[in-house]
Image (tube, helix red, strand yellow):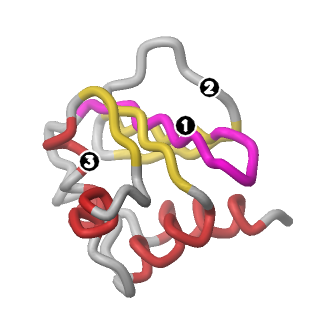
């Protein structure tokens, strides 16, 4: 199993459906050192799969180490963005909710 797959599996296991209540979103992850992943949230359910989506709500670009550190709480996502470790396109405010939806 790839490191990226492990990160997304962990995210799905930590999914907080109450934090994502009434949320419909498509997160596209463009990973510098791994295959792209899509995380879809709808009807209180989160699904992660390898691939790309044509109409993502927000697209986030980073390497797997940065993703792992943000999702584990070691690195603040906003700080990582300000430092240029994360590139974001689309609904940036939605991106700031990632760690609430998938708490460490």
**Which of marks 1 and 2 precedes in the sequence?**
1
Residue at the (59%, 72%) spot, across then down: 65
Callout 1 crowding tier (Cα within 10 Å): few <14, some 14–19, many ≥20: many
- Name the disc covering residue 52, or none: 2
Residue 28: within the magenta? yes
Q: Quadrant of residue 5?
A: bottom right
Residue that sits furthest to the right in the current view: 1
Disc 1 target residue = 38
- Name the disc covering residue 85, or none: none
Task: Give how far across and how far down residue 93 sits, in percent.
Answer: 14, 43
Residue at the (69%, 68%) spot, across then down: 6
Q: Quadrant of residue 89?
A: top left
Residue 1: within the magenta? no
SS for dot 1: strand
Q: Which residues are magenta?
A: 24-36
Mark 1 → mark 3, Cα distance in angstroms: 13 Å
Mark 2 → mark 1, Cα distance in angstroms: 6 Å
């Amino acid at each position: 199993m790839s490191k990226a797959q492990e990160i997304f599996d962990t995210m799905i296991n930590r999914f907080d459906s109450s934090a994502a209540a009434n949320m419909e979103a498509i997160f596209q992850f463009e990973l510098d050192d791994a295959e792209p992943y899509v995380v879809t949230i709808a009807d209180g359910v989160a699904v992660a799969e390898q691939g790309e989506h044509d109409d993502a709500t927000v697209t986030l670009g980073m390497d797997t180490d940065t993703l792992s550190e943000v999702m584990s709480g070691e690195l603040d996502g906003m700080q990582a963005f300000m430092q240029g470790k994360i590139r974001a396109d689309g609904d940036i405010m939605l991106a700031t909710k990632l760690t609430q939806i998938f708490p460490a």
